[in-house]
Image (tube, helix red, strand yellow):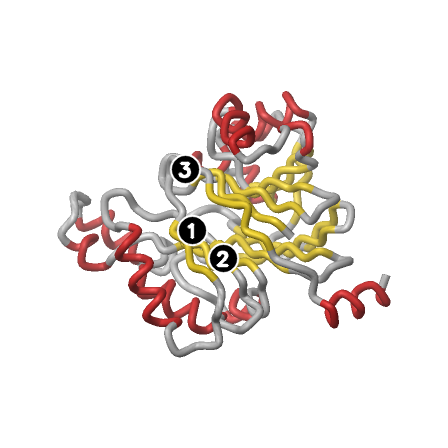
Amino acid sequence: MKVWVLGSGSRGNATVIDNGSTRVLVDAGFSSRELKRRLGSAGIPPESIEAVIITHEHSDHMCGAARSAHRWNWSVHASAGTVLGAPELVDADVRTFDAGATLTFGTMSVQTVPVSHDATEPIAVIATDIVAGARAGVVMDLGRVTTQLRDAIRELDILVLESNHDEAMLARGPYPLSVQRRIAGASGHLSNRDAAIIARMCAHSGLQHLVLAHLSEQCNTPDHALASVSAALARSRFRGRVTAASQDVVHGAFVAGRRGARAQQLALAL
């Protein structure tokens, strides 16, 4: 399993998950021209993407989806609520699902998990290589972690996790109090402290990459996010790598290898 974060932040988000035979894009929050440039930086032909899964209707996650899908023949997948909340998608050929559904693309199984965010029907994405057993999660734009999401993100090999803001920087930053409360609320965004708690909860010896994403350019820094999460992981079983993704740089490929026991179990189940 390989993951590339093509860029992450309030100006656009997109992540590629590749299991060797299938490539799926999670979110398309850049123009088709910019997506092509970023995919090119990762060595990925746009035509090799099979599908784009949109996590919610906010423009920084889906503004380039319809045009890019038409240009490169991607299938578009979004929750029914996301389509209702996104006029840009109403006339597109979108395959809808209910949050919580599991989608299948070739040998990749994608679990969608409802999350707490101020969107109509937002989701996190957990992808599993059906043959090799490797698992990758993209968990962004949420204010709190539910029991369902907590269970879904255990035993991952790669986790892209929101670490949006430093609480002190948010409090003294440029946003009015109403916006601060929205960001820090149960339907807002995860703070560095929240991300650290979740990272510690998910830490295990098989987690090879933890990528901190959706960092606020106004109320966070990579150093703040990395310090908070790394401190929480210091006495855990985690022996992987922590990376802070940025808005303007393509990060990856983050690679997870084959998992023997899981692979055998899944292969027998096919």
- Residue 249 is labelled as 3
Residue type, numbered disc 3: Val
In the displayed orientation, state which residue is furthest to the left.
Answer: 172
Disc 2 crowd, CA 10 A, few/some/many (<14, 14-19, 20+): many
Q: In front: mark 3 or mark 1?
A: 3
The residue drawn where x is 62% and y is 38% is 52
Q: Nearer the viewer, residue 225 or 179?
A: 225
Q: Nearer the viewer, residue 51 or 223?
A: 223
Q: In front: mark 1 or mark 2?
A: 1
Disc 1 crowd, CA 10 A, few/some/many (<14, 14-19, 20+): many
Q: Is residue 216 left or right of residue 32?
A: left
Taking 258 as reference, is 250 above or below it? above
Q: Is residue 186 left or right of residue 70?
A: left
Taking 200 as reference, is 7 above or below it? above
Q: Earlier in the sequence, mark 3 or mark 1?
A: 1
Residue type, numbered disc 2: Val
Asked if the residues shown at circle 1 and circle 2 are in contact, with their CB atoms under 8 angstroms apart, the answer is yes
The residue drawn where x is 18% and y is 50% is 177
Residue type, numbered disc 1: Asp
Q: Position of residue 226 (x, y in %)?
A: 33, 59
- For mark 2, give the secondary structure: loop
Q: Which residue is mark 1?
A: 141
- Residue 115 is labelled as 2
Q: Earlier in the sequence, mark 3 or mark 2?
A: 2
- For mark 1, give the secondary structure: loop
The residue drawn where x is 63% and y is 59% is 135
Q: Position of residue 260 (x, y in %)?
A: 74, 68
Q: Position of residue 103 (x, y in %)?
A: 71, 50
- Image quarter of the C terminus: bottom right
